[in-house]
């Protein structure tokens, strides 16, 4: 078979793909419905938790500080990321189908890469916020003024938008000639690359390698920030002061640990233990669990946020009571 014929066949196969087939959670109908209700519960919990945090921060002027501004951005990203993957998985489980359109798959790849990378950048910025608050408290207002916070958040959103455009365009420019079945419940770049039978995938692999270097750089920055934070906290003379300082960092540290540990395991797990079932579980851990539990983590040890959320809930309840009367 000549090379031009192979290339023509690849392009023909690629152009014939109008949809992809996602990995089903199970082939049993009763279990499909069980997964639908389970994902619906997780999704509603994420919507409620992140929605309450966004509304509480936006409505309570006492929370108009850099820390809560970045937390509001994080909640928006969490809502977006879980809404990118879970509703389609729920619909497929409910209607007993695996299909997702070519355009829908491309949109999923773009939104997921954009939102997850922006969340990682934002977590890095939040580590800097905690570093300045504890290690340089006298310069906090100068280094993290309202304009600086907006610029940092806008830079994270903007850079990650173009990063996602580059990844998506590169991924879907690769000829796909190994069918259209993906071993994942959403469109994931590594699974799409498995459908390529040409060396074109090396471009995306190279881009992923560059991305890994950026991820490592952010990780080192977060680690160094917390080394300085812990040193500063240990120098605080009073136990109450150390406890208060550490309490402001603990939720962010837990969220960062959850985000990095699940994402790292998904990317670096040994091929010998890789299987569709394990890949599915890992994908749920890094794409579904963090957006759902982040609001709980941030509100558990934050009395200001809990008070603002409770005030918001009581305000809505009293308004309903007044309208009913």
Image: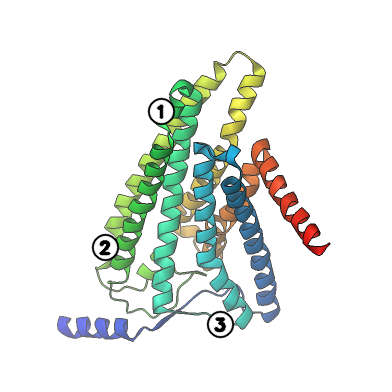
Where residue 178 sits, quadrant-wise, is bottom left
Q: What label sits on residue 97 in the rendered view?
A: 3
> In the rendered view, would you say 185 is above or below 101?
above
Viewed as shown, does residue 79 lie left or right of 132?
Answer: right
Q: What label sits on residue 142 in the rendered view?
A: 1
Bin the neighbour count of mark 3 within 10 Å (Cα to Cα): few under 14, some 14-19, many 20 and up: some
Viewed as shown, does residue 235 lie left or right of 267?
Answer: right
Give the spatial CA distance, label 2 vs label 1.
Answer: 45 Å
Give the spatial CA distance, label 3 vs label 2.
Answer: 32 Å
Bin the neighbour count of mark 1 within 10 Å (Cα to Cα): few under 14, some 14-19, many 20 and up: few
Q: What residue appears at the point 30 percent right and 67 percent down from the top-left corner?
A: 169
Q: What residue appears at the point 40 percent right and 35 percent down from the top-left corner?
A: 221
> In the rendered view, would you say 270 is above or below 242?
below
Where residue 233 sits, quadrant-wise, is top right
Residue 238 seen in the current view: yes
Q: What label sits on residue 315 in the rendered view?
A: none
Residue 294 seen in the current view: no
How many numbered callouts? 3
In x, y percent, where is residue 219?
42, 40
In x, y percent, where is residue 13?
31, 84
Q: Nearer the viewer, mark 3 or mark 2?
A: 3
Quadrant location, the C terminus: bottom right
Q: What residue appears at the point 41 percent right and 53 percent down from the top-left corner?
A: 117
Sequence-wise first label, 1 or 3 = 3
Q: Which residue is mark 2?
A: 202
In x, y percent, where is residue 73?
49, 49
Sequence-wise first label, 2 or 1 = 1
In x, y percent, where is residue 118?
42, 51
The foreground one among 231 and 52 is 52
């Amino acid at each position: 078979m000549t090379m031009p014929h192979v290339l023509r066949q690849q392009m023909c196969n690629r152009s014939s793909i109008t949809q992809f087939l996602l990995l089903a959670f199970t082939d049993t109908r009763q279990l499909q419905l069980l997964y639908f209700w389970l994902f619906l519960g997780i999704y509603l919990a994420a919507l409620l938790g992140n929605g309450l945090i966004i509304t509480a921060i936006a409505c309570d002027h006492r929370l108009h500080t850099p820390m809560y501004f970045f937390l509001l951005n994080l909640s928006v990203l969490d809502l977006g990321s879980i809404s990118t993957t879970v509703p389609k998985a729920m619909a497929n489980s409910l209607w007993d189908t695996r299909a997702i359109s070519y355009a829908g798959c491309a949109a999923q790849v773009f939104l997921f890469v954009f939102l997850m990378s922006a969340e990682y950048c934002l977590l890095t910025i939040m580590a800097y916020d905690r570093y300045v608050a504890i290690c340089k408290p006298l310069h906090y207002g100068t280094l993290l003024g309202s304009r600086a916070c907006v610029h940092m958040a806008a830079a994270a959103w903007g850079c990650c938008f173009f990063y996602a455009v580059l990844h998506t365009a590169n991924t879907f420019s690769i000829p796909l000639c190994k069918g259209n079945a993906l071993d994942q419940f959403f469109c994931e770049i590594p699974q799409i690359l498995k459908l390529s039978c040409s060396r074109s995938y090396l471009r995306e692999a190279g881009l992923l390698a560059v991305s890994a270097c950026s991820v490592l750089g952010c990780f080192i920055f977060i680690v160094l920030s917390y080394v300085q934070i812990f040193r500063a906290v240990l120098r605080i003379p009073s136990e109450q002061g150390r406890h208060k300082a550490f309490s402001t960092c603990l939720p962010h540290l837990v969220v960062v640990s959850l985000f990095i540990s699940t994402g790292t395991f998904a990317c670096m797990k040994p091929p010998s233990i890789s299987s569709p079932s394990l890949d599915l579980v890992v994908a749920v851990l890094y794409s579904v669990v963090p957006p759902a539990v982040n609001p709980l983590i941030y509100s558990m040890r934050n009395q200001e946020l809990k008070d603002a959320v409770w005030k918001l809930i009581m305000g809505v309840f009293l308004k309903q009571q007044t309208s009913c009367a």
